[in-house]
Image (cartoon, grey):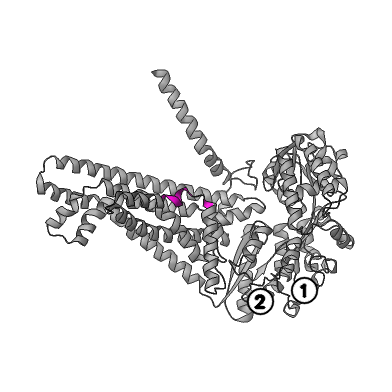
Amino acid sequence: MHKMKLSSKIYSALIFIFLFAPIVVLLVFSFNASKSLSVMSGFSLQWYRELFNDRNTLEAVRNTVLLALSATAISTVMGTAAALGIDRLRSRWYRRMMNTVTDIPMTNPDIITGISLMLMFVFVGRLFGAATSLSFWTMLIAHVTFCVPYVILQVLPKLQQMDKSLPEAAMDLGCTPIRAFFKVELPEMLPGIVTGAIMAFTLSLDDFVISYFTSGNGFETLPIRIYSMTKKTVTPKMYALATIIFFITMTLLIISNIIDTENSRELREMRKNRKHSTGQAQRKNETHSQSKHSGSWKKVPVMLLAVIIVVGGVYLGTKKTPLVLNVYNWGEYISDGTEGSLDTIAAFEDWFEETYHQPITVNYSTYTSNEDMYNKISGGAVSYDVIIPSDYMIARMTEENLLLPLDFENIPNYQYIDDTFKGLYYDPQNQYTVPYTYGIVGIIYDANVVDKADTGSWDLMWNDKYAGSILQYNNSRDAFGTAMYKLGINVNTTDTAQWDLAADELIRQRPIVKSYVMDEIYNMMESGEAAIGSYYAGDYFTMVDAQASDVDLQFYYPERTNFYVDAMCIPACTQNKELAEIFINYMLSEEPAVANAEQTYYASPNSLVYNNPDYQADMGPEAMEILYPQLDNFSESYNQFAYRNMDAEMLDRLNTLWEQVKIS
């Protein structure tokens, strides 16, 4: 018996360690003095200060809470009414059918629910000629849709457990049916209602998949913002936010347990009193006890409503401005005010109001891939005024008439864009784009592990000496690019035999690859878990800033490698083209352009940036040498090595080969 007790304690301890170890790590690293998410460098509160200075994150938190409270209030009322209706159905078959129908949203995969809701909203929006189909209201409807079944699931058992004679007893004592409901039935249901409301609030607060498919411009929730940050890496200030949320949740759970303990005590007293009561007197006493029992719960709906009114008032009060500009950009691709940098969006709003004497709100949203952005724009679900896609996607969108020609009279700062970046293949006539950043792919390696003599080419990533320390792209186009550059194959070839050769080269590399990664490369290279990986030059400096003390990250360009350009464009769905051009022109002015380049670490084609002495000093000679190689040869190298858009047949072929590489 003693051994069994000891085993059960050990088992319970292991379960708790498994559940709470990740949370403990999160709490500890929220106080880390450095950016590293893997090496503790000392105690600091800087990430909490960064968090409360991050306007975009705080707005995402506010949006998330507003959405969750609104969805909770609506779904709680609807779910309670639905539970009452189901409980009072006379047909057992019909009741079972309704229970099955309400279970479907809970068992249906979130991605199916999200896509189907998005298609419905787009269809209805087009039917009524709306400029944009997705907004806060579509997200609210979506959240209510998946929250209602959970409320029903909590309330219905309470109704089924309730003594059906209690409402009749109340009416026998003189109550009207409505009064009997509020005095007798509602108190009996309240624990289930509150539990359902808490569950709905939690589900809404945490939802990502459905929100991602039904979100519109200008309303970004916290899960979507965190996801968009994974283009680079989730910063420790998100750990700080998670720590705050954890302790708030823990406090609410403690309060809830205290209330539950009090209610249990009252219920025991009520049952004890039942033994001394009979007949109608028993029912009268029980009715009175139930009303007393509900006292501790009555404040909950009132408090919830008050919070919704306050948060909703704050949200609506801050959104009422005559002009609105919708900007859609990569995550972590602009100076946002963190670490004392310029908050570009806030600075533009202030500059615009000072210059044009009219307030403006910029709804700044982010995406994680060109394909995500393309699907939103081409589907007509949302309307944006400025987007910043990559070169091959620009070519595709131009062919499909998804971009508008620019009026460069409204963009006089275009003169500062270096001529090297004009007339490139994706926009040969310079009609649709203004270059924002550019970059070159290279190889990052740990000099403490890798011999200098082994560097200089793509061969390093196929070197058996470093088996188990090499990271390869978890992306078909980039992974094949490394093999094709190594073999001297044109990365845009349509010769299937050439693609087969590249696939064979990747299969040959597979045994020595530690992992196929994208954003995971940051933590793995910074901590020394891996020693070799191919990535973008700008991101190399982000890793250097956060590397552990025993890691020495270095970088070089192979002879043949990928060149890319991201550019500002105006989509055909814009609602204010002239305002979008004013924003683009502002982004080319010196202060925001320099701030954006310093914050993102990507090279800028703007001469006001790379000729700025302060920028050169801040970046340092090593960064300037890596980020800004000889521009004279850029256009020639770019046209030779940049990725071009591929037709559907070649994309299918590429995906098939990639699957063969991954499962070989």
Task: State left or right for residue 539 relative to residue 313.
Answer: right
Check disc 2 and give the amino acid type.
Lys
Q: Main secondary structure of the magenta part?
A: helix
**Between residues 195 and 323, which one lies in front from this camera angle?**
195
Whether residue 134 is visible here, answered yes or no, is no
* Residue at the disc numbered 1: 431
Residue behind mark 2:
577
Q: Residue at x 55, y 78 (%)?
A: 322
Q: Which mark is residue 312?
A: none
Label 1 Cα neighbours within 10 Å, binned few <14 / some 14-19 / many ≥20 = some
> 596 or 153, which is in the foreground?
153
The image shows residue 422 at horizontal and vertical percentages of 82, 69
Is residue 496 part of the magenta span, yes or no?
A: no
Is the residue 178 above or below the residue 287 in the image? below
Which quadrant of the view contains residue 571?
A: bottom right
Q: The residue under label 1 is which amino acid type?
A: Gln
In the image, the segment drawn in magenta is 103-110
Vertical comparison of 575 with 110: above or below: below
Decide: is 7 above or below 281.
above
**Whole-percent x and y of residue 306?**
37, 63
Q: Quadrant of the N terminus?
A: top left
The quadrant holding residue 263 is top left
